[in-house]
Image: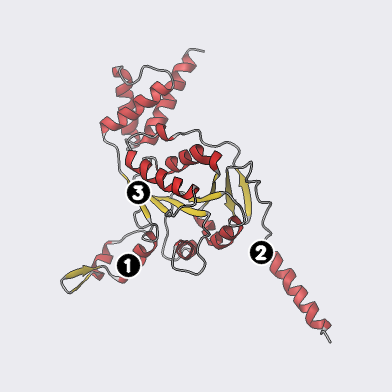
Amino acid sequence: MVDKHLIQRLEKLLDRIEQLVPPVSQIPNWQKTSAAIWQKNLWTPIKQLSKLQLNDLQHIEEQKKLLDRNTRQFLKGLPANNALLWGSKGTGKSSLIKALLHTYHHEGLRLVEVDKQHLADLPLLTEILSQFPQRFIIFSDDLSFEANDAGYKALKSVLDGSINVAPENVLIYATSNRRHLMPEFGKENTEMHWVNDELHPGETSEEKISLSERFGLWLSFYPFNQDRYLEIVDYWLKYHGLSGICEITVREAALQWALLRGSRSGRAAMQFVRDWVGTKQLHNI
């Protein structure tokens, strides 16, 4: 005979669990949706995709070639790697991933953006995505961790080293200003030790490296020098139908813009051109 009191207690327990774990919102129609944001069981479809194309990204040719090839392998069902894009701010890391979506969304590529605070949901998210025929890139931008971040272990396990690996139709592309995704402190150098004439890092450094090395593809991005920065400015000026950087006043204004921001980056170049073109057009109204 079934214990009615036990059933009642189990039903109350389930009710409490359901209150603690909110239901997953309606999954986007991936036939019509190319990108979405995942935030704690809530899907937010992206209606306006970035219009950046691969040709718009200047002076990162090797990085473009490698990530484009990896993405095409993934789309064709061939072996492909999770990718970590790390380096200086404003050099095109996240723009490259968005440009790949713009290029390949008609071939079934989809992008799901997940902030660091929601990375603990990765096992659930990858399980959901495994049910669809499209190929998904889980994108986490500007990623970095402190020592006790909950998302650290979730990301580490899904990348590699756990029975809960990502399904074959899911890759993870992450960007970071930090090579190993975690802060590095001078005191860690004291943990270095010699083993048979070889210098080995200490446990703290090994733990930090153990996450970043799970990304099979590392792409490094470096600051632009003045000439390359001006070439990017020139590209975007011509994109907007202007004569480019040939005028000395434009050149000086572009350099001053970078100086005030402390950055000769592709982002700074685009921001300068938006300001310059907008100002010119405003004066002509």
Query: Is there any visible trace of residue 57 in the rendered image?
Result: yes
* Residue 9 as seen in the image, left or right of residue 145: right
User: Label 1 neighbourhood size at 10 Å, few (<14), some (14-19), many (20+)?
Assistant: few
Q: Residue at horizontal 31%, vertical 18%?
A: 249
* Residue 121 as seen in the image, left or right of residue 11: left
Residue 96 vs 85, above or below: the answer is above
Instruction: Say whether disc 1 or disc 2 marks the residue closer to the N-terminus.
Output: 2
User: Label 3 neighbourhood size at 10 Å, few (<14), some (14-19), many (20+)?
Assistant: some
Numbered label tally: 3
Label 3 residue SS: strand
Residue contact at pointers 3 and 1, CB within 8 angstroms:
no
Q: Which image quadrant for residue 237?
A: top left
Label 1 residue SS: helix
User: Mark 1 against mark 2, which lies toward the viewer?
Assistant: 1
What percent of the width, then of the height, locates residue 137?
Answer: 50, 50
Residue 130 vs 269, above or below: the answer is below
User: Label 2 neighbourhood size at 10 Å, few (<14), some (14-19), many (20+)?
Assistant: few
Q: Mark 3 points at which residue?
A: 219
Q: Name the residue under label 2.
A: 21
Q: Mark 1 points at which residue?
A: 206
Q: In which quarter of the image is the N terminus?
A: bottom right
Q: The residue under label 1 is which amino acid type?
A: Glu
Q: Residue at horizontal 56%, vertical 58%?
A: 126
**From this viewpoint, which residue is outermost toward the bottom?**
1
Residue 119 vs 2, above or below: the answer is above
Q: Which colour scheme is used?
A: secondary structure
User: Mark 3 against mark 2, which lies toward the viewer?
Assistant: 3
Q: Give the Cα distance between marks 1 and 2.
A: 35 Å
Label 2 residue SS: loop
The answer to which of 158 and 145 lies nearer the viewer is: 158
